[in-house]
Image: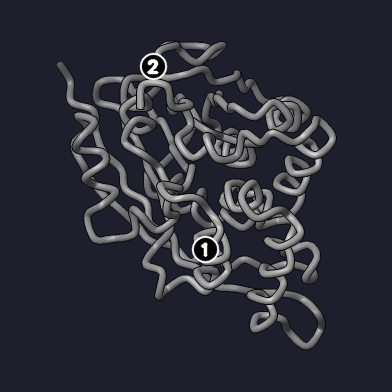
Amino acid sequence: MASAQVTGSTVDRVRTDGPAERRGRARDWAEIQERMLVPLYQDVYRQLEVGAATSLLGVGCRSGLALLLAQGRGAQVAGVEADGALREFAAARGLQVGPCGTLARSAHPVPRPAHSLVTVFEQPPVPALVAWSAERTLPGGHLVVAGWGPAEQCESAVVLDVARRHAPPGAPDPFSTAGPGALEALLASSGVRPSGSGRVTCPFAYAGLDSAVRGLLSTGLFDRAEQQAGTALVTKELEEALHPYLRPDGSVRMVNVFRWAVGVKPRV
């Protein structure tokens, strides 16, 4: 994993598309998909009492909505994000978000080398990413990791199965950290002592089928499937998988459960 991108599943969403395509996906994330995870962000911030005393670093913060919510609670915020188009949207929101290099390099620019709270809302979080984030957590500070809940509690599981069917062997599984204790084990393996956890319902609600497809494709979870099978086929199968969740007014709604865990970095 030494050459893996800092943001774990960012490996999958650093696409080979041209600038216009990447910006289009970034816009779809910022305008359609990102808000679906607001209940997760709010639950974490509420439970950890994020406020004016908090220095928060968002790792893989994408276009920065989670940072904005923390900033609204008085926290000092910064982020790192590999995708340049997503960083542009974060900058347009007035956020300080720097690029990510490989694990052999440091993220830059960030206002301080370590923070009282580091969040990894990327799904799925991977060990190298969590270890990198732990290094940027102050002793006595908190590190949060999050992921999908059990597949049987996520209506989007059947949709994500489109990605699984077409992705090459070894592609990350969105539900790899859904099992009991999996997130806590990631924290412990990075030298962070698990201290709490939570679960929250995140409804994925879209105005229509087109916006649902665009929003889901913007997550990066389908990137490898698109590279293998082509965007046209993946889009077609996504539309078919979404049909059971169409409502009479043409909107789409799926209810999903997400889990998060928090750990405390020991004081030396």
- Per the image, label 2 sits on a secondary structure element best described as loop
Residue behind mark 2: 114
Residue behind mark 1: 165
Given residues 153 and 1, the one toward you in this image is 1
The circle drawn on residue 208 is: none
Q: Residue at x 50, y 60 (%)?
A: 164
Q: Residue at x 73, y 54 (%)?
A: 231
Looking at the image, residue 44 sits to the left or right of residue 240; the answer is left
Counting other residues with Cα less than 10 Å from the Cα at mark 1, is it few (<14), some (14-19), or many (20 or more)? Answer: few
Q: Residue at x 47, y 43 (%)?
A: 121
Q: Position of residue 145 (x, y in %)?
A: 37, 43
Callouts 1 and 2 close, C-beta under 8 Å: no
The total of numbered circles placed on residues is 2
Q: Residue at x 65, y 51 (%)?
A: 226
Given residues 116 and 14, the one toward you in this image is 14
Q: Position of residue 46 (x, y in %)?
A: 44, 49
Given residues 166 and 77, the one toward you in this image is 166
Which picture quadrant has residue 175? Answer: bottom left
- Per the image, label 1 sits on a secondary structure element best described as helix
Residue 52 seen in render? no
The alpha-carbon separation of the residues under discs 1 and 2 comes to 40 Å
Quarter of the image for the N terminus: give it: top left
Camera-side mark, 1 or 2: 1
Residue 213 seen in render? yes
Q: Amino acid at mark 1?
A: Arg
Looking at the image, residue 244 sits to the left or right of residue 100; the answer is right
